Amino acid sequence: AIGDADHGVNMRRGFTAVLAKLAELDAKTVGEVFLTTGNTLISSVGGATGPLYGSAFRAIGNALPEPSAEPKQLLTALTEGLAAIQRLGAAVPGDKTIVDAYAPALAAFDRQLSQGADLASAAGSAASAAEDGMRATTPLQARKGRASYLGPRSVGHQDAGATSTALIFRALADVVAP
């Protein structure tokens, strides 16, 4: 309805390619996993989504050069990922984009770690905040991306990029859950 009908298809194609690449990867660092993910998304996902998510995953990977990562290091890396998206897409919260789910997820992750929570709790809180941010895009008028061309007709539809971002943060929470 707002011009993102191919988003899910593109995301599925991209992450299917990521899974294939990761199955072949003998990563020595956490960052290698994220860099491979980012590079694969850039090469396999169409539209703006590939470069946006690809840049985010590459920035995260560049921030994690060690074999393992502590929660605070992951927070720093996730922050770099959001910065990469915002540099490329010039979006801010309220523009009805990926950022509307990513920014609150990052804030929740940070808040939980600052309060002494473990990775699983921080990731769970981030996923919930991303889902809230995703739902909050429905009443917004898109100011960036393909949906922005529709002006007021974009109101009443959940943003596809915010939705996939919420799914990614939920996947993180699921992976690190005890």
Image (tube, rainbow, N blue to C red):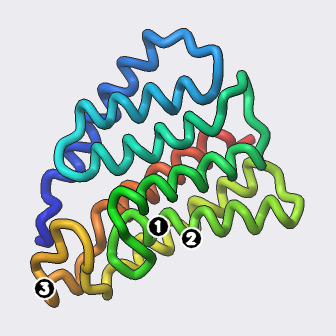
Quadrant in which residue 45 is drawn: top left
Vertical placement of 27 versus 19: above or below? above
Q: How crowded is mark 1: few (under 14 residues within 10 Å), some or many (20 or more)?
A: many
142 left or right of 153 in image = right
Q: Are marks 3 and 1 in contact (CB under 8 Å)?
A: no
The residue pinned by badge 2 equals: 104
The kind of secondary structure element at disc 2 is helix
Task: Specify the amino acid type for callout 1.
Answer: Ala
Q: Could you say which is closer to the camera, residue 29 or residue 9?
A: 29
Residue at 47 percent across and 73 percent down: it is: 133
Give the CA distance from mark 3 to mark 2: 25 Å
Q: Quadrant of residue 106?
A: bottom right
Kind of residue indicated by mark 2:
Pro
Q: Distance between the residues labelled 3 and 1?
A: 21 Å
Q: Earlier in the sequence, mark 3 or mark 2?
A: 2
Residue 157 in the image, given as x and y percentages of width and height: 24, 77
Residue 165: x and y, percent?
A: 43, 56
Quadrant of the rendering where the C terminus is positioned: top right
Q: Where is residue 148 in the image (x, y as percent from the top left)?
A: 18, 76
Residue farthest right in this picture: 116
Q: Residue 153 carries which label?
A: 3
Number of marks in the rendered image? 3
State the image coordinates of residue 88 (x, y, percent, origin top left). Answer: 35, 56
